[in-house]
Image (tube, helix red, strand yellow):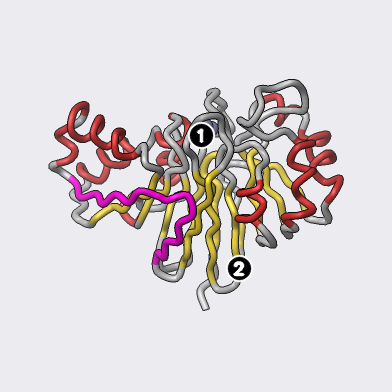
Amino acid sequence: MIEMRAVLLGTGTSYPDPQRVQSGILVEDGDRRVLLDIGSGVLHRLTQLEIDFRTIDSVFISHFHIDHCADFLPLCQSLWLSGHNKTLYIFAPPTVKEWSRGVFEIAFKYLREKISIETTILDENHVIPRGNLTVITSPTLHGTYDTRAFRVEHNGKSLTFSSDTAPCRDIIDLAKDTDVLIHECNWLDGPHPEGVHTSPSELAKITEEINPSKIVLTHLSPEVVANRDKVIEIVSRRTNAEVVLGEDLMVLEL
Ligand SMILES: [Zn+2]
Ligand SMILES: [Zn+2]
């Protein structure tokens, strides 16, 4: 049986960082390749891996903050210029409707005629089969922004990607007993706006209930990276799971 693997393409935030591009994860099983988010730099990371962008089956966009979708247009342009003639499937929250209209009917009309895109609006809790991969969504708690987290299952194994979120019941339920939890850790402990992102102590509080085998931190701001040992120590307090800081091009085999 072909196994699933994930490659972290971007583990950074909106701030430019030479080591970390914006949000993106490649998930593949030897049959399908899907992207979870496609922030700025993700397309470049794919080429670094010598992965042909034309082999991407579908793109799941967690939300329409720029650091999660900025490379979608460069991907479209590349597909056009390479003469790609297959359909690219995009899955995203309801905002995708207005976004698509702005992009393909107003700003970059020429692209719409050049490539084939099929768009599916993600419900809050949606189950989407892509070949032998199954993608399950839940809403997250990310300010007022309609956002989705993703759990990808394959042959009894799973990974769960929080996207951008503060700790919330939906994420705990989606991620329950997942093998690999890829969770955002945007900032250090301290006073922050409520209900937007997750700090190390906040993440530590939900790890016991989620019970993952491994925790990979992502959406890492420079101050989190600069305090990596402390951050890992805090997140590890209530879990036996291995806790690591994600790095661009890190491979996770499941
Ligand atoms: Zn966001
Ligand atoms: Zn973000």
Q: Which residue is mark 2?
A: 157
Give how far across and how far down residue 28 sits, in percent.
47, 61
Of labels 2 and 1, earlier in sequence is 1
**Residue at 24% across / 49% down in the picture?**
117
Q: Quadrant of the C terminus?
A: bottom right
**Ligand 2 lies under 8 Å from the Cβ of mark 1:** yes
Q: Amino acid at mark 1?
A: Gln
Of circles 2 and 1, the one toward us is: 2
Q: Which residue is mark 1?
A: 22
**Vertical placement of 87 versus 193: above or below?**
below
CA gap, disc 2 and disc 1: 26 Å
Asked whether 49 falls inside the magenta stretch, the response is no
Instruction: State the extent of the magenta-drawn residues as a range.
Output: 115-130
Count the marks: how many? 2
Front position in the image: 22 or 196: 196
Crowding near pointer 2: few (<14 within 10 Å), some, many (20+)? few
Give how far across and how far down residue 229 sits, in percent.
81, 36
**Quarter of the view holding residue 47:** top left
Give how far across and how far down residue 183 sits, in percent.
64, 44
Asked whether, in this view, residue 183 is left or right of residue 89, the answer is right
- Which element carries disc 1, helix, strand or loop? loop
**Residue at 25% across / 30% down in the picture?**
102
Q: Amino acid at mark 2?
A: Lys
Crowding near pointer 1: few (<14 within 10 Å), some, many (20+)? many
Contact? badges 2 and 1 (CB < 8 Å): no
Asked whether, in this view, residue 140 is left or right of residue 130, the answer is right
**Residue at 45% across / 61% down in the picture?**
127
**Vertical placement of 6 versus 104: above or below?**
below
Front position in the image: 134 or 246: 134
**Quarter of the view holding residue 96:** top left
